[in-house]
Amino acid sequence: MKTLIWSVAWGDYRYMTQTLMDSIRSVGINHDILTFSDEPLANVLSCEMDKSIDMDFKQYWKFHYLRKLEALDYDLFVFIDSDHYFVRKPPRDFAEIIGADPWHSFLESPINSPLTKRGDWWGVQNHAMTLLYRDFGVVQDTVYSTNGGFWMCKKPFIKHAAATGLLFRDYQRGLKLDLPEEVAIAVMSHLFSKDYSNRFHSRNMDIWASEWTGSLKDRLPSGSEWEFQEYMTNDRSTVNPAIVHAMRSKSALTEVGKKVFESTKMQRVFTPWGQVNNAGVKKGVFS
Amino acid sequence: MKTDLYVFQWISDLGGADTRLKELLVLLKDDFNITCIPNDEFRLSEKHNTDFLDSLGVKYCMPEKLPKRPKGFAYANCNFRLFKETERIDFINNLGLKLLWSNDMMWTTEEEIEAVKKGKVGCCLFTSPFHESMIGKKFIAANKDQKTAVLDNYFDSSTWPYVERPDRDTMVCGKVSRNDQMKFSEDFPFFYERAADGLPVSFRVMGWSNELSAKYSWFGFDGKWELISANQEPTNSFYESIDVFLYNCNHRFIENQSRAIVESQLTGIPVVAPNKWNFPNMIWDERTGFLWENLFHIKDALARLADPTTRRRMGRLASDCTREIWCDAPTARKKWDSLLNFVGAS
């Protein structure tokens, strides 16, 4: 499956994205990488951010960028946020993780289970969040949270994915809520999985995990084990995933990226989107 | 002496409101002098429809052919052009007829509310207490003196006979609707596939369109799917071809009194539908069909219905119960009598 890894970053997040993308290459992943940023990045296909896309605080801009990427000749689009880091090549390729379904994000933690300890997700009480899922068409008994920083979409599904994400935005706004895009992404992983247990994070701990409690605070993930805490249940376990969502390592990621930026100052240039869209990627010159 | 009833609406075989009217005319033909007045003159040349009206003794004409000072009542359901094109409702009022207006939808229009506000509607009808609970307050807020009443849907028993389904290699799950995106959930194909996962099933859906094909183009519909356009088959034949009515609609849609569910039950189909809205008043859970809360219940329902004996037993009971409730012509006529007494008294 022809796969594109992509991200969007500006400000200091551009440096983190540089570190992330270099980590992807360093573990031996050869999929194409495309970034949209405010300054050019090195070692990737670097495009300038699209000024016509509103970078809304709740991050629904991700769906607009996804629509933009539909023009490119790839089968699978893997979005990854800046504060990630690859410590090794994942044991299963992205195509294997998404499987036959058109959409993927890891379903992290149960919202309405007897195991659930936390009372809310994004400030919405669990029973109300469950009802929100239900009213948007989710039918699975136990519903889960997700992380909006890592998700995948197959090309034929892009239009419907973006439309559904934005439909959810409008839907929850209609209820006087102001939830971020990751709730939409969670809902979509329920709706668009034939068997949503394939999306369970608990079955994919070797692939990805989110470090949000400070186990790796201010350090780059090294490939050693660390203590993971599940968001809604507070369950703790020792993990060592290939992809670390290094939420508390932003400073370390930034420092590394800044050094790369400095050393590649003369090489880094934006590729015009028109060139990517019309000639570049379609002809495979960036692969 | 029969009361005159002027129906400002036309019949068709497509859409709940116009099909509902057909069966209402069958119910009322002997008790009323009925005249149908279409919105557009070309409808009068639809021979299959005028033949149907002729067979019932129902007259039809354009508004200008009506008597100058008719007696009786005007009736319409779902003909929102009466309000959007205000000359239509004004025409009815100027004739001195009280309009019995059945909205049938879960929403109202500004023009409709404006007419209620100005006292132009004799009585606002709801098809169920649930329906009244959804929109009734809007009418009363617009006009505190507005008369309202609940008048159930009526189904003509002979139109929807019970049919014993043959043994088939697969259990056919399906549904029928107009080709409206609101009648399909965002995850429509996954909803069906998940529900029947692991069972020997095939799917038949009538109400498909090019727009729906485009919307769900990302899904690989395989040989177990048959998606046909609205009215591609006579509705009875379609019902005969399915074993289970697996209800599905978009989250933005609220179902009121789905005629398809009642029709399918009359023909002997168990219905699997969510346990909300008016469905608990239409489906006897675990006896004539299943009402679900979540995927576990849907899968359990279909697994139980996969047994032909079970689904025949439930389908037979669904047909009998539904016929008793929705096809009770004497009771339906009494309700009309009461309604006219209520509206006629001012």
Image (cartoon, rainbow, N blue to C red):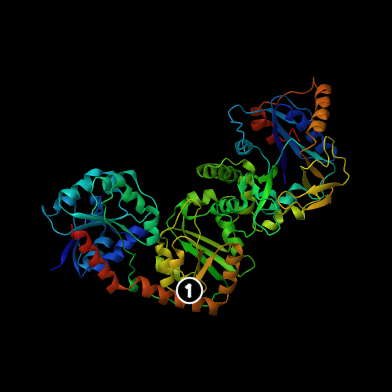
Q: Amino acid at mark 1?
A: Thr
Question: Which residue occupies 28% across, 65% down?
Answer: B24
Q: Number of callouts in the render?
A: 1
Task: Please state the chain letter of the residue tagged with numbered disc 1 in the rendered image.
Answer: B
Q: Is residue B317 visible?
A: yes
**Element type at mark 1:** loop
Farthest top residue? A266
Q: Nearer the viewer, residue A281 or B30?
A: B30
Q: Is residue B14 visible?
A: no
Query: Against B130, is B315 above or below?
Result: below
Q: Is residue B48 left or right of residue A218?
A: left
Q: Position of residue A180 (x, y in %)?
A: 62, 40
Q: Nearer the viewer, residue B150 or B312?
A: B150
For label 1, the residue is: B288
Q: Position of residue A229 (x, y in %)?
A: 78, 49
Farthest left residue? B68
Q: Position of residue A217 (x, y in %)?
A: 82, 37
On-image quarter of the C terminus of chain B:
bottom left
Q: Is residue B105 left or right of residue A1?
A: left
On-image quarter of the N terminus of chain B:
bottom left
Question: Which residue occupies 11% across, 54% down?
Answer: B69
Mark 1 crowdedness (10 Å alpha carbons): few <14, some 14-19, many ≥20: many
Q: Position of residue B263 (x, y in %)?
A: 40, 68
Query: Against A264, is B82 above or below?
Result: below
Question: Which residue occupies 60% across, 26% down?
Answer: A51
